[in-house]
Image (cartoon, rainbow, N blue to C red):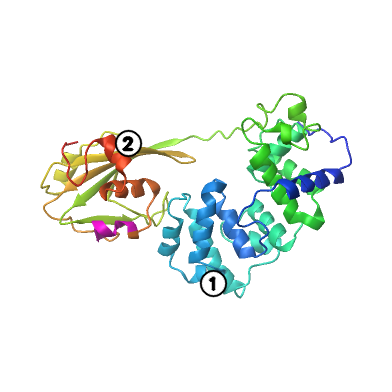
Amino acid sequence: MTPRVVPYFLPMFADTLLQWFDTHKRDLPWRGETDPYRIWVSEIILQQTRVAQGIDYYRRFLEAFPDVAALARADEAAVLKVWQGLGYYSRARNMHAAARSIMDEHGGRFPADYAGIRQLKGVGDYTAAAIGSIAFGLPHPAVDGNVLRFVARYQGIFDNIAADTTRRQIADLCGQWLATDRAGAFNQAMMEMGATLCTPKSPDCSHCPFADQCYAHLHEQTEQLPFKSLNVKVKERFFHYLVPLFQEQTILQRRSHDDIWKNLYEFPLVEQESEHFEINIYLKNNHIETSAPPQRFWQTKHVLTHRNIYAYFYLVPVKRLPKPTADQMVVKISELKNYAVAKVTERAIDILLGDDSTAQLQLDFNPKNPSRPC
């Protein structure tokens, strides 16, 4: 379906949008920023992350790595530790790699052209356009989910916004409307419109400056638009984590293969096809002698984009720690929080250390002093 033609002179769209933005934009720590490094950090953090959560991470990240040189010098483990809790850890790994390429290939200067920005690892069309327009005034429209939703409603576009053809169609429209003298502000205003007024559910049409022009509002289609169909098959995975415990020590291993949570630490893992796990048989077959019955002390469901992770954690008091494999190491229980881990493992560590009273109350037992078997 082709978009309807907006029945008024297009430059008025940019004028109206920018007037609204200048008056109503949120006060965010990266607002008004022109340093491409800081803009880059904010844009990567805000991918798959709510603004409220992203603000603290943005500040902590810049405190740890104030410029691209500091990020390039850092160990990946340190970068992942600062990123811990944000999820989608490939973002942090890609930023680290890109920072090193900026130092090695660009003499430490952030590329100032769209093609150069786009070539950085982990930077796509949207992020390159956002950085380029905000930092350097480059006239490229930045089209994210907020912009897709706003334009689809405004123009009455019923095509699937997950399809590349529809995304290009909307990007072309935004390119026509773009205020080239304020490209950065225009892109931020489009995103702000979708984030604050033209929200996924119950959009605030009463305060929208385009309500009397918006197809979806005029035709009562705000709940129907935009149309999005991913047709993504969600895979279910079952992770059974063993936490061997001997003299206040345990074992951690690093996920080195290409999979979720790459290069993060976790407890020894047995992945099964279901929740069912014969832990006692597993321990016997692997010659692991226990000093008390193993305890399942926590379980959770963790939802990722294409996967549902069902994680089960077992405390296993042992007579001696198993010999670590090449990717494993012995760690003091008291030092577990020094390592970058995924959210599910972080919560398990909190329970082990007694830092999660809510979970312990729910479980009705303390993993440090287990009282019931699996």
Where's residue 153, x and y in %? 72, 33
- Look at 73% across and 53% down and name the residue there: 185
**Other-residue count near label 2 (Cα within 10 Å), few / some / many at <14 / 14–19 / ≥20:** few
Q: Nearer the viewer, residue 331 or 106?
A: 331
Where's residue 172, x and y in %? 77, 45
Task: Classify the position of the C terminus by image quarter.
Answer: top left
Task: Tell me where residue 130 sits by quadrant.
Answer: bottom right
Task: Classify the position of the N terminus by image quarter.
Answer: top right
Whether residue 290 sits left or right of residue 167 in the image: it is left
Q: Amino acid at mark 1?
A: Ala
State the extent of the magenta-drawn residues as a range. Answer: 329-337
Q: Is residue 49 visible in this depiction of the protein? A: no
Whether residue 338 sits left or right of residue 245 in the image: it is right
- Look at 65% across and 65% down and name the residue there: 35
Q: Amino acid at mark 2?
A: Glu
Label pair 1/2, CB-CB below 8 angstroms: no
